[in-house]
Structure formats: structure tokens, C-alpha cells
Amino acid sequence: MRLSRALRTILREDSRGNTNDGCSKRGPETSSKRGFGVRSHPGGKRSEAAPGPSQLDAKELFMKNPTAIDPAMQSCIKACEDCHRICLTMAMRYCLEMGGKHVAPEHFRLMLSCAEICQTSANSMLNASPMHQSICRARAEVCDACADSCDQLAGMEECAKVCRSCAESCRAMAGGSK
């Protein structure tokens, strides 16, 4: 297959790291690995690149990035993810092994429902659903019920604690109290 002269030149320059497009990782035009930071221009002049996220304050960053998530919502999302993880893990790895009351249909279904609604709630906040407050209210109710159920069984203290914390976070996000 014959390559055009321009393509051969580009490939040759790329293999040497001497491109003019400013994207070369090893080219002499940048002082950092990825081509960000201080740039050297012909004639030895240097100029600063645009400031990175660490150089902007939080409000300025949020204004520049409308997809940024409010810190209170980030905290609620983390609580949802933690509750989802512990309920699902405890149900599948602990309750099933323990048997007896740990796998009683009402308790086991409640744990799985809690895990699912926590995942749904986190997703609704991440995708900026206008329904996230309603989902958070429902989640708080389910998390409280799951915590109460876990309190009645041996070895489920951590699950109950995480569910209660998640319920509190949800009530705050939904703008209500118990």
C-alpha cells in the first residue's frame, strides 16, 4: 500500500516526537508529560497555559462546569452508594450463610429493596432528575425500615448504622424531617 507524501511526513515526525500540533507527549514545545502547563514558543518566549482545576476556587469551577455536583448532594450520593453496597453484600454474603431469621422473606426482601432504592436514588441525583427529592423521601423510609429489621438480628449492627445514616442524609436532601 502506497502512502501519500504528507502521511509519510506526519508519521516520520510523529515517530521523532516533533509534531507541530501541540499534542506531542515528548515534543520540545511543552514542559509536562501531557502537553499542559508552560509552553515554549519559537524565539524562547514562554507563556502560561490556562489554569487547571486546582488553580480555580470551587465557585468559579462550578460556574465554568454546570455538571459539577453540590457538596451536600455528593455526600448524599456517597451515603446511598455505601448503603447499597453494605445491604447487598450483607444480604448475599452474610444473611444467606447465616440462614434462619436472616433469610426470612420479609427481612431479606427489605435488604434487597433497600440496596436497590439506594442505587436508584444515587442515580437520580447523578443524572439531575427533577424527581430526586421524592426518591430520597421514599429511600429514607425504606432505609429506616431496613435498619429496624437489622437491629433485631445478630451481626447486623453495621448494616443498621449505615442504613440510619443514609436515611438521615436522604431526609436532609429531600428537605424534610422524620
Image (cartoon, rainbow, N blue to C red):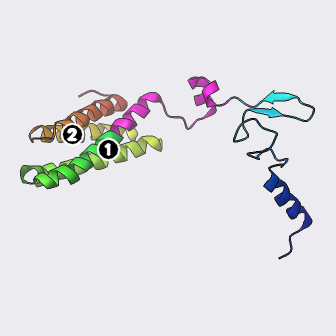
- Residue 154 on the magenta segment: no
Residue identifier under label 1: 118
- Badge 2 element: helix
- Mark 2 residue type: Cys
Q: CA distance from mark 1 to mark 2?
A: 13 Å
Q: Residues within 10 Å of mark 1 (few under 14, many from 20)?
A: many
The answer to whether one can see residue 130 in this image is: no
Residue under numbered circle 2? 159
Quarter of the image that includes the N terminus: bottom right
The answer, for residue 2, to whether it is visible in the render is yes
Which one is earlier in the sequence, the residue at label 1 or at label 2?
A: 1
Q: Is residue 59 magenta?
A: yes
Q: Residue at x 85, y 47 (%)?
A: 20
Quadrant of residue 72 in the image?
Answer: top left
- Which residue is located at x 43 percent, y 33 percent? 74
Residue 173 lies, in percent from the top left, at 36, 31
Q: Which amino acid does the dot numbered 1 rest on?
A: Cys
Residue ranking furthest to the bottom: 1
Image x and y of residue 170, in percent: 32, 34
- Provide the major secondary structure of the magenta segment: helix
Identify the secondary structure beneath mark 1.
helix
Q: Residues within 10 Å of mark 2 (few under 14, many from 20)?
A: many
Which one is in front, 126 or 86? Answer: 86
**Residue 143's image quarter?**
top left
Question: Along the horizontal axis of the image, is 52 left or right of 173?
Answer: right
| Quadrant location, the C terminus | top left
Tell whether 51 sits left or right of 110.
Answer: right
Location of residue 140 in the rendering, given as x and y in whole percent from the top left corner: 27, 37
Q: Nearer the viewer, mark 1 or mark 2?
A: 2
Query: Which residue, as the protein is rendered here, is positioned at the far front?
Result: 16
The picture places residue 161, in percent across and down from the top left corner, at 21, 33
For the magenta stretch, what is the residue range? 52-80
